Image (tube, helix red, strand yellow):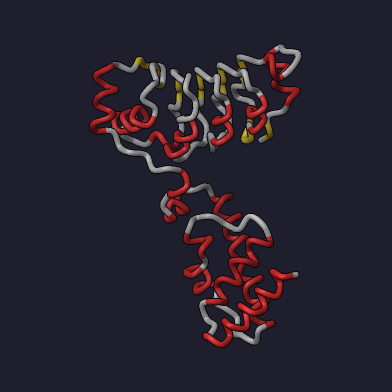
């Protein structure tokens, strides 16, 4: 797998600069990172079929995009479609062949059209006015990406689960290091997993600083009033430095 590069874009589009690219076809290029599209401001037609794309976040910057082909990628949640709501000209979308399409083609189609009512062609099939109206009445509302259920962790690929597991162990180590310095007993992994706010939100820590912060927040839950007063005074002193 690889990242979309400037060289690949210019070669495929036969363009002298990214600003000149209006149509880009990188079908079957083994891509899993297309963040470069944020720099292709005039892009109108984008073909990403047969790659390993799992998120549509970067596409929200392509304001001129009218056609998007995503067949056979790794998009697991229809929530990713909310990133396409910011594209006023998008009228053609081909999403078939992704895990998010599910086993009920009717429910899937109505949900997509409810989220993106301006589509004229979905999965190479024209959208009728009757279908568009039915989607608004009976289509399932797709939840935003930010509030996905935490139990969706069970359905993500094993490599992502492993990464989250590594983050859990890192957070636990940070927490117990601080607990040791305060003279507290180590926190068991199972108790940590149940009380860690980052894991309850379905997101691993993104940096060491954020992990330390969440470890401190966990410790505060066990401190008594007089101990919290000490923390408060220390915090105030730090803020005055």
The residue at 71%/72% (across/down) is: 238
**Residue 29 spot, x, y in % from top left:** 64, 26
**Residue 17 spot, x, y in % from top left:** 74, 17
> Can you say whether 23 is above or below 236 in the image?
above
Q: Nearer the viewer, residue 213 or 31?
A: 213
The residue at 68%/61% (across/down) is: 208
To which quarter of the image does residue 33 belong?
Answer: top right
38 relative to 5 in the view: left or right: left
The residue at 49%/70% (across/down) is: 195
The residue at 39%/33% (across/down) is: 101
Q: Nearer the viewer, residue 160 or 141?
A: 141
132 relative to 153 in the view: left or right: left
**Residue 175 spot, x, y in % from top left:** 62, 73
> Can you say whether 24 is above or below 100 in the image?
above
**What is the count of numbered marks?**
0
Quarter the N terminus occupies: top right
57 relative to 18 in the view: left or right: left
> Can you say whether 210 is above or below 57 in the image?
below
Q: Nearer the viewer, residue 9 or 82?
A: 82
Quarter the C terminus occupies: bottom right
8 relative to 217 in the view: left or right: right
> Can you say whether 182 is above or below 175 in the image?
below
**Residue 15 spot, x, y in % from top left:** 72, 13
């Amino acid at each position: 797998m690889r990242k979309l590069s400037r060289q690949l874009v210019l070669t495929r589009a036969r363009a002298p600069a990214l600003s000149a690219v209006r149509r880009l076809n990188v079908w079957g290029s083994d891509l899993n990172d297309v963040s470069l599209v944020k720099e292709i401001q005039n892009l109108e037609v984008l073909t990403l079929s047969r790659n390993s794309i799992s998120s549509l976040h970067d596409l929200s910057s392509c304001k001129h995009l009218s056609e998007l082909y995503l067949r056979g990628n790794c998009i697991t949640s229809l929530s990713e479609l909310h990133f396409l709501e910011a594209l006023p000209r998008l009228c053609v979308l081909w999403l078939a062949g992704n895990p998010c399409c599910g086993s009920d083609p009717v429910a899937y189609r109505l949900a997509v059209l409810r989220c993106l009512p301006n589509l004229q062609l979905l999965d190479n099939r024209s959208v009728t006015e009757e279908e568009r109206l039915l989607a608004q009445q009976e289509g399932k509302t797709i939840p935003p990406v930010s509030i996905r259920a935490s139990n969706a962790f069970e359905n993500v690929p094993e490599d992502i689960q492993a990464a989250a597991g590594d983050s859990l162990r890192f957070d636990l180590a940070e927490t117990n290091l601080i607990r040791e310095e305060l003279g507290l007993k180590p926190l068991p992994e199972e108790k940590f997993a149940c009380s860690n706010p980052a894991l309850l939100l379905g997101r691993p820590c993104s940096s060491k600083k954020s992990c330390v912060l969440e470890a401190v927040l966990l410790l505060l839950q066990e401190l008594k009033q007089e101990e919290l007063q000490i923390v408060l005074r220390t915090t105030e002193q730090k803020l005055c430095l």
